[in-house]
Image (spheres, helix red, strand yellow):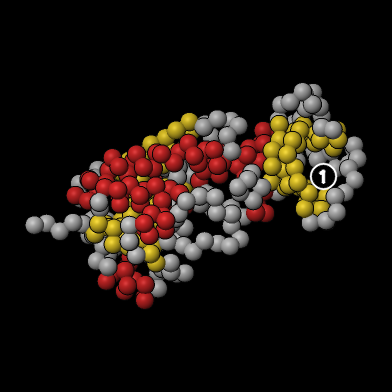
């Protein structure tokens, strides 16, 4: 009788949860989950694969650094036949990838080769993309550069936040894995090399990356706002020691039409309208932080 292939699952986020849940619902032999401790500084607004693992008695490991000799030895002792990585945030060394005779595969939150790297959905929203997706690909030394097994996309709207885009694309991950898991376990999955000439790469985003540059166009600033609004750290502008968080804005409201000024200039207080590089934005949901709320004046610049 042929032994059931042993799957080692690296994962985090709700994408990791939904894919691990699929494997466990199928009865696949998941020998362990390697994941992250939740960051106390991060708003955890999503399910994590730890929930699914504990419901099914799958051992959960949270190494701070997975590529140490100690952890490579511990992973080798698990004798994985197949490694799956789904939104695991750290690079996995070639030594670990080589431990699985059926290969190591990753589910990435973009339509590769576009948006390799970190925070692909946030970057896609920031750039105004009309379509995003999930891609299953072989893991190689370079991030998100391995041959593609399958991908599925979904349209997003020009007013969708990053969280709304994430919710739309989340089912694509489960669909792709469901279509391909039997082929992966049999070692028969078809792979298509990526066209590196079409690749784009973006790094991780920090809260400081939410700073608004008022010289940009209204649409560019609006895309930044919707890419980092709650539950992400948010877009902001500073006025002296005070910080104005901008959780939502309107690039084309009656209050902005035909309005021009120096970038960052306050054109109106009620509603709050600020000049951009090509027009104006109405700031509809804001929050002051870090200092007493300053008195705003028309003509003042943020």
Identify the residue at horizontal 81%, vertical 35% (top origin).
272
**Is residue 10 shown to the viewer in this render?**
no
| Left or right: 45, with 186 as reference point | right
Image location (x, y in percent) of residue 216: 71, 38
Say above or below: 38 vs 106: below
Identity of the residue furthest to the left in this view: 1
Q: Residue at x 54, y 38 (%)?
A: 164
Residue drawn at x 55%, y 54% is 44
Q: How many marks?
A: 1
Q: Position of residue 19 (x, y in %)?
A: 36, 48
Q: Please tell me whether residue 65 is drawn above or below residue 185 in the rendered image.
A: below
Quarter occupied by residue 174: top left
Question: Could you tell me residue 57's position as x and y percent?
Answer: 32, 61
Give me the residue at 76% from left, 30% from top: 279
Q: Residues within 10 Å of mark 1 (few under 14, many from 20)?
A: some
Question: For this rendering, which residue is in front, 154 or 147?
Answer: 154
Mark 1, residue position: 302
Q: Secondary structure at mark 1?
A: loop
| Left or right: where 200 falls relative to 300 | left
**Position in image of residue 46 (x %, y %):** 50, 50
Nearer to me, 277 or 36: 36
């Amino acid at each position: 009788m042929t032994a059931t292939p042993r799957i080692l699952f690296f994962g985090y986020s709700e994408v990791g949860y939904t894919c691990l849940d699929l494997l466990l619902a199928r009865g696949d032999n998941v020998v362990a989950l390697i994941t992250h401790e939740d960051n106390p500084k991060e708003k955890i607004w999503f399910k994590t694969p730890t929930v699914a693992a504990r419901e099914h008695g799958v051992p959960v490991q949270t190494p701070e650094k997975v590529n140490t000799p100690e952890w490579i030895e511990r992973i080798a002792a698990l004798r994985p036949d197949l490694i799956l990585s789904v939104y695991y945030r750290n690079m996995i060394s070639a030594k670990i990838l080589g431990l699985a005779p059926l290969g190591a595969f990753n589910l990435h939150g973009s339509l590769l080769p576009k948006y390799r790297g970190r925070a692909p959905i946030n970057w896609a929203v920031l750039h105004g993309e009309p379509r995003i997706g999930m891609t299953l690909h072989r893991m190689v030394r370079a991030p998100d550069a391995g041959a593609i097994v399958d991908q599925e996309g979904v349209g997003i709207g020009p007013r969708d936040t990053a969280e709304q885009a994430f919710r739309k694309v989340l089912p694509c991950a489960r669909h792709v894995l469901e279509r391909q898991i039997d082929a992966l376990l049999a070692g028969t999955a078809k792979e298509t090399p990526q066209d590196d000439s079409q690749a784009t790469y973006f790094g991780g985003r920090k809260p400081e990356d939410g700073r608004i540059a008022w010289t940009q166009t209204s649409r560019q600033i609006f895309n930044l706002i919707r890419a980092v609004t709650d539950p992400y750290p948010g877009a902001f502008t500073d006025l002296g020691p005070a910080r104005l968080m901008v959780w939502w804005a309107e690039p084309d409201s009656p209050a902005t039409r035909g309005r021009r000024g120096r970038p960052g200039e306050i054109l109106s207080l009620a509603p709050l309208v600020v000049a951009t590089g090509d027009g104006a934005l109405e700031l509809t949901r804001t929050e002051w932080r870090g200092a007493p709320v300053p008195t705003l004046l028309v003509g003042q610049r943020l």
